[in-house]
């Protein structure tokens, strides 16, 4: 199948690309490299021993999208491109609405112009907001607590209307829980700009000696050990969910939102211990005040993914830490060669 992948050079995109190529799909990557490096694509080509086209462009640029669609004629689109930093989204909400919401509308319009009716979209468990109950199932009320989360919620609704209005259109909205880990090769992985916002990249940089210690944001939550509890999902399992979603979209119609998690959780301290075990390095930490906007616990209900996609997560926290460490220790500066 011909799959156009927006944001394919990014963290989740590059891991998904690798699996698409290994499954013999034909791929075109559409990315402006605003948060990624062409080096990631070079390494994916090497790992898959396969080539693909790259179109450098912004999803807000209708002309560039037209060129890519007209030339490649995709059967389906996987849409990863967008901005994703929660804190930054509160400082620059209009950038987030322009890139994530307007950019997604441009993409849907290009799909319509070029008669491409199948879409898989990267959403986030952040659309649920404060838990009314756990685990979050797909019927849980949607009340995102920040502009980033609202862009995901708005785009979900836009996609739902688009799929309802267009005969035979099929959209799968994947709500990711906490993606972590890296390809087992250690050649591709998560390469955040500057100081990481997220837990596992931060721990990895402490372990490799780039940062001195981890700040644990709150030890007084109502959880097993007082620290925040999350449903971490290995990026390789997550990538596999996209291939299952693409296959599902060839027989389904309309729009389905589906959680992608493991249904199991780990606390901050449990992740620190698991990472120490996997890396053989100490990860010193200090308890700090809670981070504003954080919830105590997050956990996915995973039965819908199993029922509709035939997909379940296979890898555990030890695999997540081990592969993150492989990547971080082999590439202490990520894709940059310093
Ligand atoms: P990433 O930043 O590594 O990848 C995003 C890619 O999109 C990058 O290559 C970037 O250069 C590109 N891009 C950004 N804006 C663009 C634009 N306007 N036009 C073209 N390309 C653009 O992020 P990721 O972690 O791989 O996340 C992928 C998607 O999954 C995002 O939509 C994100 O919101 C969503 N998501 C991520 C997480 C997570 O924890 N990583 C969790 C839930 C949802
Ligand atoms: C964050 C985003 C969420 C996004 C997700 C992507 C916020 C409020 N939420 O979720 O919208 O979809 O990333 O994976 O930013 N922690 C520390 N020290 C750190 C970093 C994190 O103790 O230096 C703790 C947090 O308090 C939390 C856990 O680790 O309990 C996980 O944090 P993080 O990786 O940032 O993910 P989320 O907050 O779940």
Image (cartoon, helix red, strand yellow):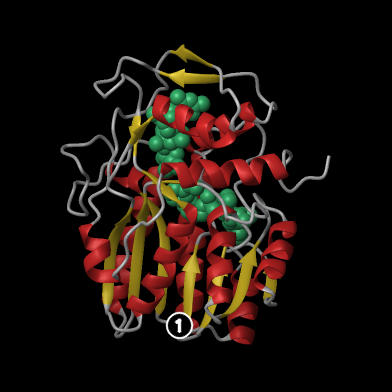
Quarter of the image holding residue 62?
bottom right
Picture coordinates of residue 334, whole percent (x, y): 71, 44
Q: Position of residue 89 (x, y in %)?
A: 49, 38
Side (left or right) of 193 relative to 288:
right
Q: Is residue 293 positioned above or below 182 on the image?
A: above
Q: Position of residue 207 (x, y in %)?
A: 62, 28
**Residue plotted at (62% across, 26% down):** 206
Q: Is residue 242 depicted above or below 151 in this figure?
A: below
Crowd class of label 1 (few under 14; some 14 to 19; many from 20; radius 10 Å): some
Q: Is residue 198 visible?
A: no
Query: x%, y% of residue 291?
Result: 42, 22
Judged from the image, the secondary structure of the residue bearing numbered disc 1 is loop
Compare residues 284 and 336 and report the one nearer the observer: 284
Q: Which residue is mark 1?
A: 116
Question: Residue, x 58% and y 23% (percent of image)?
Answer: 282
Give the residue drawn at x 70%, y 27%: 210
């Amino acid at each position: 199948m011909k799959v156009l992948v927006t944001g394919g050079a990014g963290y989740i995109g590059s891991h998904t690309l690798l699996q698409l190529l290994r499954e013999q799909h034909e791929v075109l990557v559409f990315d402006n490299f605003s948060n990624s490096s062409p080096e990631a694509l070079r390494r994916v080509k090497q790992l898959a021993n396969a080539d693909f086209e790259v179109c450098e462009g912004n999803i807000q640029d209708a002309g560039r999208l037209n060129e890519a669609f007209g030339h490649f004629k995709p059967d389906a689109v996987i849409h990863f491109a967008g901005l994703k930093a929660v804190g930054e989204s509160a400082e620059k909400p209009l950038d987030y609405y322009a890139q994530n919401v307007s950019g997604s509308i441009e993409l849907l319009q290009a799909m319509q112009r070029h008669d491409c009716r199948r879409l898989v979209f990267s959403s986030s468990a952040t659309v649920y907001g404060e838990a009314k109950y756990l685990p979050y199932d797909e019927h849980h009320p949607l009340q995102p607590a920040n502009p980033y989360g609202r862009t995901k919620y708005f785009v979900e609704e836009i996609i739902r209307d688009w799929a309802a209005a267009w005969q035979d259109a099929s959209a799968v909205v994947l709500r990711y829980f906490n993606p972590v880990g890296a390809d087992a090769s250690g050649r591709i992985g998560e390469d955040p700009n500057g100081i990481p916002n997220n837990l596992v990249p931060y721990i990895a940089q402490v372990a490799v000696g780039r940062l001195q210690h981890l700040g644990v944001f709150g030890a007084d939550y109502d959880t097993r050990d007082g620290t925040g509890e999350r449903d971490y999902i290995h990026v390789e399992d997550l990538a596999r969910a996209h291939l299952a979603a693409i296959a599902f979209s060839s027989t389904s119609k309309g729009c389905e939102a589906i959680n992608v998690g493991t249904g199991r959780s780990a606390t901050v301290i449990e992740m620190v211990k698991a990472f120490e075990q996997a890396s053989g390095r100490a990860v010193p930490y200090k308890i700090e005040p809670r981070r504003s906007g954080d919830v105590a616990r997050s956990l996915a209900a995973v039965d819908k993914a199993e029922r509709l996609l035939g997909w379940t997560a296979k890898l555990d926290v030890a695999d997540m830490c081990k592969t993150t460490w492989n990547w971080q220790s082999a590439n202490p500066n990520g894709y940059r060669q310093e």
